[in-house]
């Protein structure tokens, strides 16, 4: 089971230690399908970016669902926002980030790489 409460715990810890104040937290918009396209797992077609076609012996780390897609697109949007804030203010964090820097880990796939998505989006905006 995916420990989603870890995001709340991290926020609470940042507040408790006064590393951040409540006004430091902002809510991102989800990444678009165009943002995600090209930075997803292997064999994801451009027509079905939210419904990936996995190679036969590979599995996602968590079960595929529409809620998973929505959460990952929101996480990618958070990484885009964090990158923009870092360029503007010198610092930006995404405490809801979901990616690792590579697709394969222990025979499983990370569904998206939100860092790569953020980099590509900023490159496109430049």
Image (tube, helix red, strand yellow):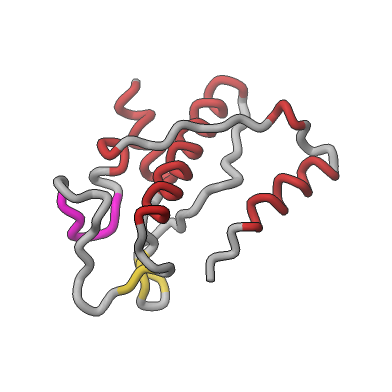
Classify residue 33 by image quadrant.
Answer: top left
- Range covered by the magenta-colored residues: 40-45
Q: Residue at x 54, y 66 (%)?
A: 2
* 17 horizontally vs 32: left or right: right
Residue 93 among those drawn in magenta = no
The answer to whether residue 38 is above or below residue 56 is above
The extreme right residue here reads 17
Q: Residue at x 85, y 44 (%)?
A: 17
In terms of depth relative to the viewer, which is nearer, 54 or 39?
54
Q: Position of residue 98 (x, y in %)?
A: 49, 53
Q: Position of residue 80 (x, y in %)?
A: 45, 34
Q: Position of residue 107 (x, y in %)?
A: 36, 77
Q: How many marks?
A: 0
Q: Residue at x 76, y 35 (%)?
A: 20
In terms of depth relative to the viewer, which is nearer, 54 or 105?
54
Magenta part, dominant SS: loop
The answer to whether residue 53 is above or below residue 30 is below
* 51 horizontally vs 101: left or right: left
| The C terminus, quarter of image | top left
Q: Residue at x 60, y 33 (%)?
A: 92
* 29 horizontally vs 92: left or right: left
The extreme front residue here reads 66
């Amino acid at each position: 089971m995916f420990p989603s409460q870890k995001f709340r715990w991290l926020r609470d810890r940042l507040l408790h230690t006064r590393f951040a104040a409540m006004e430091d937290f902002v809510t991102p918009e989800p990444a678009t399908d165009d943002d995600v396209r090209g930075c997803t797992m292997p064999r994801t077609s451009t027509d079905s970016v939210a419904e990936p076609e996995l190679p036969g012996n590979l599995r996602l780390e968590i079960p595929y669902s529409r809620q998973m897609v929505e959460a990952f697109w929101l996480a990618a949007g958070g990484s885009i926002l964090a990158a923009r804030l870092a360029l503007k203010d010198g610092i930006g964090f995404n405490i809801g980030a979901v990616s690792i820097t590579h697709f394969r880990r222990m025979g499983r796939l990370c569904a998206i790489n939100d860092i790569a998505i953020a980099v590509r989006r900023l490159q496109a905006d430049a």
